Image: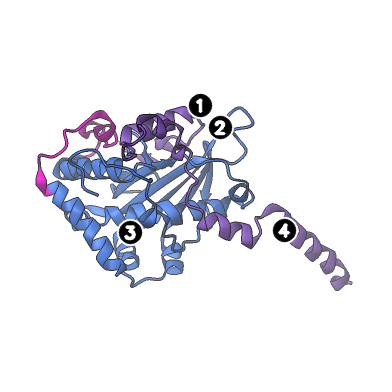
Chain colours: A purple, B blue
Amino acid sequence: MRIRMLVPALVLAVGAAAGGCATSEEWAEWRAHSSHFASGQHATFSMRNREGTAPRVARADIDAARSENWWGKAITVSPDQIFQN
Amino acid sequence: MRGARWAAVGLLVLAAGAGGGGVALAGPIEDKVIPLERYTTPKGRALAAAHQPRLLKFSEYVYGCLPWVDVQKQSIGFQRPKFAAGDDRYFSTWVIIDQKEDPQFGAVPQPRRMSAMFSRFGIDLMRRMATIHDVVVDSNVEGFSVVVSWLKPGTLKSGQPVNESVAVFVEKAAALDYLEGRLPAAELARRVRPLGFDGQKDLGVIPLEIWDDPLMATYKVPNYEPPPGITC
């Protein structure tokens, strides 16, 4: 009787785990992936570089790219939820 | 080899600190450091006053050498965790990662995402913080704390972006044992205090895993030139 109840529970648990998680292959791919950064877009960077000159990226270019990709003010934990002064 | 590489990073940070002159401090560097007037206890103020130049150099180093990391304003300093009964001060940094939406990342359960982001960014930051020798050896510094925030997958589409955050506190001995290879990652994970936040919702202590992730040590923005005066 107990075994009969256990089997569906296990099936449900495995199904939920598989549905809610990335597969190990997908996860491995994320971990190996190095270009997650939204400010890594090259549109702004390339504007500064003229043909025939060595390309270079300055800190200000990255700030500009970050502003371009800014998605609006995100709801974030407040410092006083973590720290006390 | 790994130790030598981090020793070199440490020397660069310290050399920058010793150099004095160098880069003129600008807003984006100075505003990341907690101002002295924000400390409310003598211990906090004394620590900040003693190490403020080093904190500024650290801020400058992160700004110039890790441009893909955005440091939260007024977050580099000596923070006292909310859970501390006494005036325990942790050398702290808070970074925001402007990570793109990624379906693979979004499919991972939230505690695992927090583990991944802390393993990737938090551990590396802590490693770099641990190279600031004078701060590390100060007996008034209890440990390290690193907060990592990033866009919660799927919230951009909803019109109200939300950041997930993980705040990790670790005592100095455990951190240094791990960084110097005397403590396995799994044991470090048992000895830290990891707090999770979904937006402003406090998730409490979360199950944190820690593993090696070399991205921060190896990633380079192609053709990036640090600002003049900053050596990476």
- Name the residue beneath numbered marker 3: B171
Residue ID at (35%, 41%): B67
How far is the residue under mark 1 from the one under mark 4? Answer: 33 Å
Q: Which residue is mark 4?
A: A18
Residues at discs 1 and 2 in contact (Cβ within 8 Å): yes
Residue B170 percent across, percent down from the top left: 36, 57
Residue labelled with disc 2:
B161
Task: Give SS at disc 1.
Answer: loop
Q: In the image, B230: left or right of B196?
A: left
* Horizontal relation, residue A68 to residue B70: left or right: right
Name the kind of residue labelled 2 in the image: Pro
Q: Residue A26's spot in the image, x, y percent?
A: 62, 57
Q: Is residue B55 above or below residue B217?
A: above
The amino acid type, in three-letter code, at marker 4 is Ala
**Magenta segment, which residues?**
B18-41
* Residue A9 rendering spot, x and y as whole percentages: 80, 63
Structural distance between the alpha carbons of marks 1 and 3: 35 Å
Q: In the rendered structure, are the residues bearing label 2 and label 4 in contact, judged by CB atoms less than 8 Å apart?
A: no
